[in-house]
Amino acid sequence: QVQLVESGGGVVQAGGSLRLSCAASGSIFSTDTMGWYRQAPGKQRELVAASTSGGRLNYADSVKGRFTISRDNAKNTVALQMNSLKPEDTAVYYCNVLRAPGYYSGRSYSTSVNYWGQGTQVTVSS
């Protein structure tokens, strides 16, 4: 079982920076996608950034050029550096691990599995 614990949220003024970190316990495989989602009040959860197994980095258009995702497979961690924050970045940010179907460490996964952290609040004041 995978458990994800986020840290680094808080309150910051517009234009400021925050760094979110996520530590994963349990088995994380290099083929897993690790990423960050966010959910603002009254809105659906949306993808912010993701690091795929092939080393591809995906970003939401709204954060391109401002946010950077980084992943350390040896430490089972993923981080999100957020610069030039805007009030519209205010949301609860969730760490995510997506495991594709396959056979991993003696266990078969017939469907994709999503693991989620508990979320960390980011508030950007204007």
Image (cartoon, helix red, strand yellow):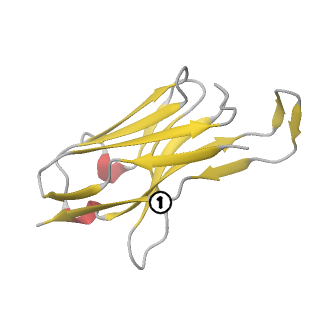
Disc 1 is placed on an element classified as strand
- Residue at image location 50% in from the left, 43% down from the top: 35
Question: For mark 1, does the 10 Å Cα neighbourhood hold few (<14), some (14 to 19), or many (20 or more) residues?
Answer: some
Q: Quadrant of the C terminus?
A: bottom left
Say above or below: 84 vs 100. below
- Residue at image location 49% in from the left, 65% down from the top: 45
Say above or below: 123 vs 50. below
Q: Is 66 placed left or right of 22 in the picture?
A: left
Q: Is 102 placed left or right of 66 in the picture?
A: right
- Which residue is under mark 1? 46
- Residue at image location 52% in from the left, 58% down from the top: 118
Q: How many marks?
A: 1
Residue 93 place in picture, x, y as percent: 41, 57
**120 or 54, which lies in front?**
120
Residue 5 place in picture, x, y as percent: 51, 47
- Residue at image location 60% in from the left, 27% down from the top: 53
What amino acid is labelled 1 in the image?
Glu
Tell which residue pokes out farthest to the top in this image.
74
Q: Is 29 placed left or right of 45 in the picture?
A: right
